[in-house]
Amino acid sequence: MPVLLLLLPQPLVVQVVPLEARCPQLSPLPEPALLLLQDADTGAAGRADDMHSPEAGAGEEAEEEEEEEEEEEEEEEEEEEEEEEEEEEEEEEEEEEEEEEEEEEEEEEEEEEEEEEEEEEEEEEEEMGSAGIGGDCMVGGKGVWARGEH
């Protein structure tokens, strides 16, 4: 009788069982054979061609499910980390914007104070110049400054 040998992971036990007339379409062999897989841990058995059945490879399915769950958990953790990083970046950007706004406000206040001081100085100079009291004034409006009364 021809035998098909499969190399499988260690916990699986392979048994070759003649099919006889039960299921000749499963194998092209002249003497059909059915491979039964038996999980050494759980004792579950199933046909090699029907790995989707609940009995077939129960240990493998459990391992696959565990791996899938671990992968999903890792993906969720990565997503959470990415979200946390994005939130931190947004907070940093907001803080930077607030600092910039505060700096701009301070600069505007300083500029306003400087302008007020300049206006006060100009007013004082105009008052002193119009009173004719020895201040600096422009002679003839040509950009020449002179000291004293004019």
Image (tube, rainbow, N blue to C red):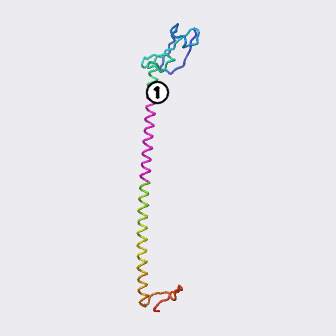
Q: Residues within 10 Å of mark 1 (few under 14, many from 20)?
A: few
Give the residue displayed 41% in from the left and 66% down from the top: 106
Which x, y percent locates residue 134? 44, 90
Give the residue displayed 40% in from the left and 73% down from the top: 113
Give the residue displayed 42% in from the left and 70% down from the top: 110
Which x, y percent locates residue 16? 52, 12
| Amino acid found under the numbered disc labelled 1 | Glu
Check if residue 82 falls in the magenta segment: yes
Whether 118 is drawn above or below 48: the answer is below
Check if residue 77 falls in the magenta segment: yes
Q: Main secondary structure of the magenta part?
A: helix
Q: Which residue is mark 1?
A: 64
Which x, y percent locates residue 26? 54, 14
Which x, y percent locates residue 3? 56, 12
- The one nearer the camera, 140 or 2, is 140
Magenta residues (range): 65-92
Callout 1: SS: helix
